[in-house]
Structures are given as structure tokens and as C-alpha cells.
Image (tube, rainbow, N blue to C red):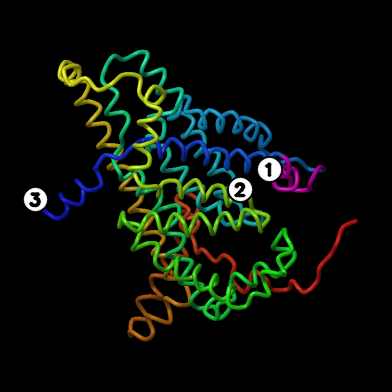
Amino acid sequence: MSQAGKLWDHFLQRRSAVGLALFRVVYSLALLGEVSELIWFRHLIFDPVPYEIPASWPVDLMLFVWIPVTVCLMFGLWTRLMTILNYGFTLMTFGVFLLWEYHIDYVYCGINLLLIFVPVEEVLSVDRIRRDRMSTSSKEWACSVPRIHYDALIFVGIALVYFDSVFHKLSTRMWTEGLGLWQALALPHTSIVNVGWLLDQEWLMYFLGYLALVFECAFLPLMWIDRFRPLLLVIGAGMHLGILCAFPIPWFAIGMLSLYLLLVPDQWWKGIASKTEGFVRSNPTDVAEIQTESSAWASRQIRGRSQAAIVGAIALTCFVLQSLQTCRSPLAHTISSKLGCSGFMTNMAQVAARLHPLSRRWFGATPHTVYLFFNYNDNNKIYTLV
């Protein structure tokens, strides 16, 4: 078998669908929070003159329809239709925000595109219950999914974001000198709690700052090795729990934590599935039953492989587009200059700049310049509204 064939078989390995289902629920909660905030601030965000000149398109209708769409997605009801509507609403909001954007917007663009094809409704969903009532076939196939669905969501939602982010952080003294986390926590307008006691722990702050940097550097190569995934889960979940507690961006933290659920080892999900078998699976596996419905089994197998191929193609497209955007980073230009290929890198950066509006909106591929020095420029004045 060729290397490509072995790689494809690796990504088609079966994994429990429970992890995808729990990801769907938690991710939908984060998305529900984001949409609720868009509704609350819709006049400030969408009106040309807030409360005076309304938006020229039916923003209110879209946002209030988005709420039930997100709820249906959470419960796994009409999942395919809901994911398509959800992605359409994403393109009209998170995909085009400039003044009101923040970092999780890019992740929503890529993940919501993948959700159209990822079978997140296979278990713990209304669609699953409805399908079981209409079908007498074995439920074992539907309780597992190709691992590519897990890997693609992690790759697009976490790994590519970190991959680009480190190219910017490593060219910033704030991070290379271990003060990246300290800087973010020290400013009152970027944190919601007073952690002066923590900021005074010099070596702890250095350790956490460098740990975050090393973690982002190591995530992309280590995510493919299953035995390292529990370590990545503990560090990454701890980091985003800290963000949830310390920074005014709770939906970002919850959205990223939902992605970290996908790093939970498959054996853990199988253990959960075995303890909730009556809820996850309606009937035990019946080999004879599978043989009597071989045509239905073959059809489902073909559909599953087609979904996996599409998800893989989207993830590969995101990688190419994100790599182009990384060519625009200062560190990429520094490395190319030392290697004597600065002209090539400049050309790639120009191509990336032209593609940026498309790649950012449709795939979430953009420079991930988060928590860098320029985020704190001109913040030497603090105003209090009484």
C-alpha cells in the first residue's frame, strides 16, 4: 500500500462519536452567547448612526432567526440544514467584522464551515433518536466516526491559529522575554480581576509566559501523536480556563474549551458510551442484521467516506491559505532573508494580501496577531464612566 493509502486509512480509523456530540453542545453554547451579545449591541454594531439611522438590511431578522438555529444545532435537530444556515449567518457577521472583530471570529468562520460536513449529530441528538425510530439497522456504525473529523476540527480551530500566532509572538520582545501573559494581566482594561498578587510572583509569571509560547510552538506537531494529546488537553484547557476567569472574553474561552474536548482520548469516550448505552445506542450490534441490510450499510459507508474526503479537503485548503498569511509575518521575512529567499517570500506575502479578504471570510485564515505589543498602544489613559 502506498504512503498516501496508509495515511488515508489512518484518518479513516473509527473513533467514538460521543466526543463530537459533546463538542457540538458546548460549542453551540458559546455560539449562542456570541449571537445574544450581537443582538444586545446590534444598534452599535450594524447601524450607520446607532439608534438614529438603522441598517439597510434586515439585521434584526437574521439575528433573531440565528438564535433558534443555534439551539437546534445544540440539540442536534435538523443538523445539516442548521449548519448551513449557521455558516451563512457567520459569513454575514463574523466574516466581515472589522471594527468589532475579535480573535474567536476567525475560528468561527473555519469551524462553522467544517460543521456542514462533520457528523456531529451521530449520537446524543434529536436527529439520532428520529433516525433510530425509522430504521432497524445496526447502530454500531453510527456510534463511531472517522478520526479525520476530530483531527480536522482541532487542526483548523486550534493548531493553525497557534501556528500563525507564534510567528508573530517570536518577533515580539514582550513574548520572547517571558512577559506576554504578565502584560495582558497587568492592564485593567484587558483583565476583569485584580491579580496583583499573582503578577508579583516573578518566576511564576516567567514560567507561564514561556509555557504559553512553547505550548503554541509544539501544538501542531504533537497533536498528531495520540499519547501527547492528554498533555495538550491539560495545558490548553488550563490556559483557556484562566482566560475565562481573568479576561472579558468568556465566549472565546468556552469556544476554545469546546475544541479541547476533541483531544480527550478515545478510550474515555468509549467508557462514557458504555455507561450510557441506552441513550447513545438504542440496540446492540447484530451482525446478521448488518448482513441483511448490506446495501444500506454500503450506502452509509460511501457517504461517510465522502464526508471524510470533503472535510480533509477543507482542512488542507485552510492550511494552504493560513500558510500564505503566515508569509506576511515579520519572523517569516527575517527567516527568508537569512536563507536568501526574501524575494520569494515577498511575492508570497503579496499573494496572501490579495487573497486575505476571501481567506479570512470564508475559511478564517488570517494573521493571528493576538496579545501583541500593538494591542496595548495608546492605552496610557484610563477612563471610568460613572
The kind of secondary structure element at disc 1 is: helix
Residue 190 drawn in magenta: no
Q: Dot 3 lies on which element?
A: loop
Which residue in the protein does label 1 denote?
A: 37
Specify few, some or many for label 1: CA neighbours under 10 Å numbering under 14, 14-19, or 20 or more: few
Residue depicted at 16% across the width and 15% down the height: 292
In percent of width and height, residue 8 lies at 21, 48
Location of residue 33 in the rendering, given as x and y in whole percent from the top left corner:
63, 41
Q: Which numbered circle lies on residue 344?
A: none
| Disc 1 residue type (three-letter) | Glu
Residue 157, given in percent of the width and then of the height, sits at 45, 52
**Counting other residues with Cα less than 10 Å from the Cα at mark 3, is it few (<14), some (14-19), or many (20 or more)?**
few
x 27%, y 31%: residue: 303
In the visual, does 81 lie left or right of 246? Answer: left
Which residue is label 3 attached to?
A: 1
**Which of the two labelled residues, at mark 2 and mark 3, occupies the earlier sequence position?**
3
Mark closer to the observer (1, 2): 2
Quadrant housing residue 323: bottom left
Residue flagged by tag 3: what amino acid is it? Answer: Met
Residue at x-position 26% and y-position 21%: 138
Q: Which residue is mark 2?
A: 251
Q: Quadrant of residue 300?
A: top left
Residue at (33% x, 84% y) in the render: 339
Judge by depth and name the residue closer to the eye, 268 or 125.
Answer: 268
Q: Is residue 46 magenta?
A: yes
| Magenta-highlighted residues | 40-51
Looking at marks 1 and 2 on the same chain, the residue that comes earlier in the sequence is marked by 1
Q: CA distance from mark 1 to mark 2?
A: 10 Å
Alpha-carbon span between mark 2 and mark 3: 45 Å
For the C terminus, the image quarter is bottom right
**Alpha carbon distance from label 1 to label 3:** 52 Å
